[in-house]
Every structure is written in structure tokens, then in C-alpha cells.
Image: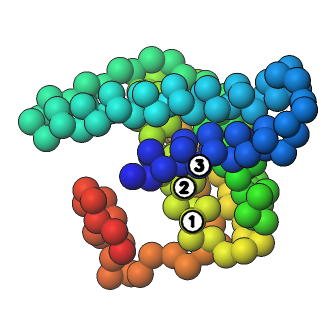
């Protein structure tokens, strides 16, 4: 639901921005329309991912690794959230590296970031701060999403990776 709700929220917010200026030309709203189309494409991929989820239940998981520029991926995922955070009086800070190419499944990393950012926005306080950082250590990539929200109860930490668990 996180992954479906977020693109729908982004599309809704972009369309609401367009409706604020009903006399504007299409070119004036190109960036809003572009983000909306991007999110609609992502929704389409999510439907495909639901099929992947069904396959994973039958132990048939498909991973498509390829070289991915992590800076570009993180910014692509973060940009719509930055806009939403401004509307919600929250602040997102993104700290990237000079260049970091990683051989990974871009779609799966995208999914993970969407879930983490969605939760960070949802559970951070008004005027809250959310941080996304990328680091390299010992030939490994580390992405951190941090917020100053309510957090996870210690007794629930081991349960968060169970499918459909909600604290």
C-alpha cells in the first residue's frame, strides 16, 4: 500500500498545483505533468511488481542487476518527496557522494527507498527533518534514511521485516 499510495499522492499534488493556475499554458505546467507521468509509469511497474511478489511466494524471484548511478537513483526517488515535504512543512536533506556506481537491481532499490521515505514523511513530526545519505565503505554502498519522528518500539524492531507487519 505504501508503494501505491505514494505515487498517487504525488500525482494528486502535481495535478492540484496545475489546477491552481487554470489559465496557464501546458508548457507552464510541463514539470508537474512530467512528474505525474513518471509516477504513473511507476504505478504501472508496481502492478508488475505485484506479480513478482506472487512469484516470490512460489520461490521464483527475478533480480535484474545492472550498473546504477546511486546519486541519480536517490535524487529521482527523493525529488517528489521533497516537494511533498515542503507542503507538509517538513525538510528533506539529501547527502550524496561524488560518484558511486553500484551493480544492483534498480527497481528493488527504488522500491525500498519509496517505502523508507514514505514512512519517514508519515511518521516525522510537523517541521520535522528527514535525511537521506549515501556512503561507500569497504567496497559497499550504504543508504540511510533517517527522520526525527516517533521511531519503532524496541520490541517491534525484529518484526518490521515480516511481510505485511504494521506496528
Image coords of residue 123 (percent x, y): 56, 70
For the residue pair 17 and 19, the one nearer the viewer reads as 19
Quadrant in which the C terminus appears: bottom left
Helix, strand or loop at label 1? It is helix
Mark 1 or 3: in front is: 3
Using the image, determine if residue 89 lies above or below residue 113.
below
C-alpha distance separating marks 2 and 1: 6 Å
- Nearest the viewer among 121 and 131 is 121
Q: Residues within 10 Å of mark 1 (few under 14, many from 20)?
A: few
Residue 91 falls left or right of residue 124: right
| Left-right relation of 151 to 1 | right
Q: Secondary structure at mark 2?
A: helix
Q: Which residue does the image show at 61% across and 26% down from the upper left?
A: 37
**Mark 3 surroundings: few (<14), some (14-19) or many (≥20) residues within 10 A:** some
Would you place residue 149 above or below residue 76 in this image? below
Disc on the earlier residue, 1 or 3? 3
| Residue 52 or residue 30, whichever sits in front | 30
Reading the image, the residue beneath label 2 is: 118
Q: Earlier in the sequence, mark 3 or mark 2?
A: 3
- Residue at the image position 76 percent from the left and 53 percent from the top: 93
Whether residue 81 can be seen here: yes
Image quarter of residue 153: bottom left
Q: In this figure, which residue is indicated by the disc labeled 3?
A: 9
Q: Where residue 4 sits: x, y (%)?
A: 44, 45
3 vs 2, front mark: 3
The residue carrying mark 1 is 122
Q: Are marks 2 and 1 in contact (CB under 8 Å)?
A: yes
Amino acid at each position: 500500500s505504501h508503494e501505491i499510495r505514494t505515487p498517487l499522492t504525488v500525482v494528486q499534488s502535481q495535478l492540484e498545483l496545475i489546477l491552481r493556475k487554470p489559465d496557464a499554458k501546458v508548457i507552464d505546467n510541463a514539470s508537474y505533468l512530467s512528474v505525474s507521468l513518471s509516477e504513473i509509469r511507476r504505478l504501472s511497474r508496481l502492478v508488475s511488481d505485484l506479480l513478482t511478489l506472487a512469484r516470490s511466494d512460489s520461490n521464483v524471484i527475478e533480480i535484474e542487476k545492472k550498473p546504477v548511478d546511486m546519486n541519480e537513483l536517490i535524487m529521482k526517488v527523493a525529488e517528489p518527496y521533497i516537494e511533498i515535504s515542503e507542503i507538509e512543512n517538513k525538510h528533506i536533506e539529501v547527502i550524496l557522494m561524488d560518484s558511486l556506481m553500484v551493480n544492483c537491481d534498480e527497481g528493488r532499490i527504488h522500491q525500498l527507498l519509496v517505502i523508507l521515505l514514505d514512512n519517514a514523511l508519515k511518521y516525522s513530526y510537523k517541521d520535522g527533518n528527514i535525511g537521506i545519505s549515501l556512503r561507500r565503505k569497504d567496497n559497499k554502498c550504504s543508504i540511510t534514511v533517517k527522520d526525527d519522528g516517533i521511531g519503532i518500539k524496541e520490541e517491534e524492531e525484529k518484526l518490521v521485516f515480516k511481510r505485511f507487519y504494521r506496528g
